[in-house]
Amino acid sequence: MKKLCVLIAIFVAHVCSAQVNKDDISIVQFSAGFVKAKEISLDLFKNYNTQTIYMEKNQKLFAREKIKSLPTIILYSDGEVIYKIDGGISMELPEDCETNIQHHIDEILRSRF
Amino acid sequence: MTKKLLTIIMLLFTTALFSQVVTQEKIKKVRQDNIFKKVFKYATPFVSYSEQNSLQGIQTFYVTQQSELIETTVRNPNNFSFNFGIRKLARYGFQDKVSFYTGNEEKSSSQDANIGNVDGIEYLFNYSNGRMQGQEFTNKDFFVRYVAKRYILKAEYLKNEMVDIEYASFDARWRIPIGKRFNLSIGGIVRSNPIAYGHNPIQKYFDDGNPWYLLSYDYANHTDQIYQQVDFNGNIIGYDYFWFDENGNQMASSDEEYRRVHFGRIVNKYNSEQLSEIGDFLYLSGTIGADYYFYRRSVWVHAYINALSYHNVLEGDERYSYDNFIGDDKWVDIKSGITFGFKINRWFGLFTEYNYQTYWGKEIQSIKTGININL
């Protein structure tokens, strides 16, 4: 019984874990309080997993994901980085970044059929 | 009944279309997006024809009284299959992409699961006509599923004349996502059942006190004639029966030969006709399901389970319903499957797939497992 409880606990932890959600199609915006105005709204991609993570609270995570510019947006498909775009020195995301993300999502979906 | 279910499938299809409309944020966006383009985007219409040699039986001969040799080997004409349809079914990460769909692909686990690898509408319409080992067949496989954030609709119709299956179902559920990988679902399912499972007409015939030969007289119009068996000295050593068909032609020269060669066909025909007289059944059942999917290149798990219980007969002769047969309307039907695999490094990988289904007491299991070593 104890073993079963442990297994269930591990399973629940696994299900609910992952600080950065990389499952399925996920769009993660890495940002910080001082560049909040430069972020884009991820509402356009609400049919997929979206997440915005702030550097102030997740420094280790930023180091692990090798985030060097802010803001940075990464598109994941089943854990793999498909597309990465960042603000660079100007800390300004390109105007067409939503279009580019959508284009890559279309490619991911196409590859699944 | 099949017509009703086909209507339900069509309704689901239109509901799915409608759902695509209502989930748009703005009417303006709906106008901009061509709804038919959305439904048919990523779909693959296909037409295919294939033909190959059929398996040939072992060479057999018959020798006449005059020692004339006659070959009796059964020669089957070539197998062929003509398929056409349209499919929009997302593959899971661990499934290989097919370059060309022919319509003869093995049924994908994404059809059995409640949730596919994409949300929204998925479907398969596959019609095939052909011949296999001399037997002609027409198969139909229709499948529509719409997965929304909070609900799932699914309809299926399968008619496979090669394995004599006809089945239809409509499934509506409330979806409860738990995390990003796990989903629970609860709802109802309507299933057609073309056979009165558990009911065996020939067994009932015998249980009613009828001897086997009465079926031959009354049902097949066969007749018999008694004869005495004597040895070379003229002593009676027993008796047996000649059997004659409805035209008076002799079929067998003993009861044993008649039962061994002919009686099985009569029983099959009797069972089939009696069951078709009982007619189809339509059951409404409560269902609860769970789906789990996790995929990375080096490890993947996909599991689903559906448990069906609290069954109600919507249509059909209740005297022959399955719940009447087992004396309980809360039996549990299960449909489940798990696929698991991993790659330790570039050269070693393991995969396992297990499926289990029990519907109306009929169990179907399949397992595939293997190791890949790339040298």
Image (cartoon, rainbow, N blue to C red):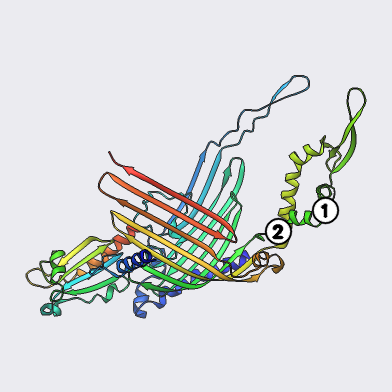
Structural crowding at the residue carrying mark 1, measured as other residues with C-alpha within 10 Å and reported as few (<14), some (14–19) or many (≥20): few
Amino acid type at circle 1 is Asn
Left or right for B175, reference B279: left
Would you say B138 lies left or right of A6 here?
Answer: right
Q: Residue furthest right?
A: B234
Viewed as shown, does residue A67 lie left or right of B322? left
Image coords of residue B228 (percent x, y): 90, 33
To which quarter of the image does residue B108 belong?
bottom left
Instruction: Count every numbered label the image shows and give the total.
Output: 2
* Amino acid identity at mark 2: Ser
Q: Which residue is mark 2?
A: B276
| Label ID, residue B345 | none
The chain that hosts pointer 1 is: B
Q: Nearer the viewer, residue B337 or B192?
A: B337
Q: Is residue A91 above or below residue B348?
A: below
Closest to the observer: B242 or B148? Answer: B242
Of the two numbered discs 2 and 1 in the rendering, the one whose residue sits closer to the viewer: 1
Q: Dot 1 corresponds to which residue?
A: B210
Asked if residue A2 is positioned above or below residue A40 in the image, the reply reads: above
Q: CA distance from mark 2 to mark 1?
A: 21 Å
Tell me what residue is drawn at x 47 percent, y 55 percent.
B355
Query: Could you tell me which chain the residue with mark 2 belongs to?
Result: B
Residue closest to the far front: A2
Give the residue displayed 35% in from the left and 54% down from the top.
B94
Question: Which is nearer the eye, A85 or A69?
Answer: A69
Tell me the SS state at disc 1: loop
Where the N terminus of chain A falls, by quadrant? bottom left
What residue lies at 69% left-to-right and 63% top-to-bottom?
A: B279
Residue that sits furthest to the left in the current view: A89
- Quadrant showing the C terminus of chain A: bottom left
